[in-house]
Amino acid sequence: MFAVYAARIDADNPLGGLETGERPDPRPKDGWTTVTVKATALNHHDVWSLRGVGLPADRLPMILGCDAAGFDEDGNEVVVYAVVADADAGGGDETLDPRRSLLSERYDGTFAEQVAVPRRNLVPKPAALSFEEAACLPTAYLTAYRMLFEKAGVEPGATVLVQGAGGGVSTALVLLGRAAGYRMWVTSRSEAKREAALKLGADQAFASGARLPERVDVVMETVGEATWGHSLRSLRPGGRIVVSGATSGQVPPAELNRVFFTQLSIAGSTMGTRDQLGRLLRFLEQTGTRPLIDRVLPLRDAAAGFAAMIDGTHTGKIVFTP
C-alpha cells in the first residue's frame, strides 16, 4: 500500500527524513482491526517525530500520522482514536496508562491507505461530518475539548484566555469555546493571526504580553516559557491555568509566590479519552461547529503539507486524502 513514513531522523531538517512509497499492508493482531483511510490530518507531533522526539531511530521506518477517518472492515464509517493504551491501567482513562503511546510512535500510523488499530479505538462517525472534518478531531480538537470541558472547571459565560492564537489546539479552543458560550480571548505576536482568531469567533485579541482589560477565569497554555509569566499575571485570584504543551520551552520561572498568594491552580492536560472523542463528535453534530481546514492535499503531496506546517504558513488543519 502507499504510505508516508519516517525513514531517517534529522533534528535540523525534518523533511530530509520523510519518504513516500509502498509499505507492507497492515496485519492486525488479536483484538485489532484494519481501517481503510479516507482522510487523515497532519499534527505537529508528526514533525516532532521526524526530529526524533518520541520516535527513536531503531523503530524506523515508521508510517506517520495519528488522526484518521474511514471505513472499518464491515463498511461502517468510523473515526480512529489515536491513543493506544489499556484504559484499566489508567483507572478508566487511557491517557493515564503509563505505557500509552500514540499511533506512529510504536505502531504504524494513519498516513497510508490502511491502518491497523485496536478494535476499541474505533468511534462511529456522524453522517453530518465529512471524512475530512472528522479526521481533524482525534488529536488537536480532542485536546481542546478536554481542556475546556474537563480541566478548566468553569461554566459557560466565563472568560478564557488562549495563549498563542493560530495553532491547532488554540484554533480548536476558540471554535469549541465560542460554541459552548465561553467568552474567548486570544493572544498572538502576529496581527494576521489575531485577525483570523476574531473571524473564527474570538471576542477579543491582544498582542502577546499585553495588559488585559480585566483578569480572566482560565488561561489555556500551550506555549510555555514565552507566555507563562503573562498567564500568571492575567488570572483572577483563584483562577486556573490549563497546560497541554510548551512549544517555547518547558522550564519557565514558576513564580510560586504569585501561585500561592493568589491561590492559583495549574492543571495538566493530555489528549482525551475515547469516550470524550465520542462526545466531541456529538458536540459538533449538535452545534454545527466544524473544524477549520486550511487545505486538503493528496497523500502523495504530503511533503508540501509538512513544509507549510514547519514554515507556519497555514491556518487550520492540513488534511491528506489517500
Image (cartoon, rainbow, N blue to C red):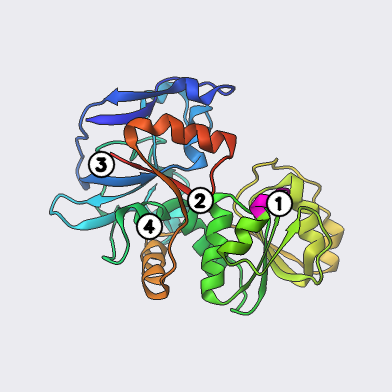
Q: Earlier in the sequence, mark 1 or mark 3?
A: 3
Picture coordinates of residue 238, whole percent (x, y): 76, 72
The answer to whether residue 54 of the structure is visible from this angle is no
**Residue tagged 1:** 191
User: Could you tell me which secondary element the residue under label 4 belongs to?
Assistant: helix
Q: Earlier in the sequence, mark 1 or mark 2?
A: 1
Which disc is residue 316 wearing?
2
Type of the residue with mark 3: Ala
Crowd rating for badge 3 (residues with CA inside 10 Å; few <14, some 14–19, many 20+): many
Could you tell whether 14 is left or right of 198 in the image?
left
Q: Residue furthest left?
A: 74
Q: Earlier in the sequence, mark 3 or mark 2?
A: 3
**Residue tagged 4:** 88
C-alpha span from label 4 to label 3: 21 Å
Q: Earlier in the sequence, mark 4 or mark 2?
A: 4
* Quadrant of the rendered image containing residue 207: bottom right
User: Could you tell me which secondary element the residue under label 3 belongs to?
Assistant: strand
**The magenta segment:** 189-193
User: Could you tell me which secondary element the residue under label 1 belongs to?
Assistant: helix
Type of the residue with mark 1: Glu
For marks 3 and 2, give the one nearer the viewer. Answer: 2
Picture coordinates of residue 8, whole percent (x, y): 45, 19
Picture coordinates of residue 74, whole percent (x, y): 12, 54
The answer to whether residue 58 of the structure is visible from this angle is yes
